[in-house]
Image (cartoon, helix red, strand yellow):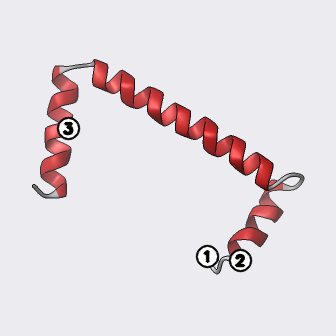
Amino acid sequence: MNNIDYVKLYAEKMRDDNRLFAQQKILIESQLRGSSSLFKRMFKGDFKTEARKYLKGRGLI
């Protein structure tokens, strides 16, 4: 099964069972809250400046 087949299968399952969408939404919102909390703790103060320093230090920008 390639990626597009998986996406089609998942979309069909979500269409047939709306509970999957609700579960996915809860998961995504939970991950968003966790990431937000982590980054707020990592980059206290000026978020943008501190985040840039971090990314530059990792060679990502």
Most distant residue in the right direction: 45
Residue type, label 1: Leu
- When the figure is inspected, residue 49 is found, relative to residue 43, above or below; the finding is below
Q: Which mark is residue 42?
A: none
Residue 49: image quadrant is bottom right
Residue type, label 2: Lys
User: Which residue has dot 3 on it?
Assistant: 10
Quick one: quadrant of the C terminus?
A: bottom right
- Residue 53, image x, y percentages: 78, 71
Asked which secondary structure carries label 2, the reply is helix
- Residue 29, image x, y percentages: 53, 32
- Residue 7, image x, y percentages: 20, 46
State how far apart marks 3 and 1 are (Cα).
33 Å
Asked which secondary structure carries label 1, the reply is loop
Residues packed near mark 2 inside 10 Å, few (<14), some (14 to 19) or many (20 plus): few
Asked which secondary structure carries label 3, the reply is helix
Q: Residue at x 62, y 36 (%)?
A: 33
**Lateral position of residue 58 relative to residue 5, left or right:** right
**Lateral position of residue 30 relative to residue 53, left or right:** left
Q: Residue at x 37, y 25 (%)?
A: 23
Label 3 vs 1, first from the N-terminus: 3
User: Which residue has dot 1 on it?
Assistant: 60
**Lateral position of residue 36 relative to residue 13, left or right:** right
Q: Residue at x 75, y 63 (%)?
A: 51
State how far apart marks 3 and 2 are (Cα).
37 Å
Q: Which mark is residue 56?
A: 2
Whether pointer 2 and pointer 1 mark residues with C-beta atoms closer than 8 Å, the reply is yes
- When the figure is inspected, residue 16 is found, relative to residue 41, above or below; the finding is above
Q: Residue at x 20, y 38 (%)?
A: 10
State how far apart marks 2 and 1 are (Cα).
6 Å
Quick one: quadrant of the N terminus?
A: bottom left
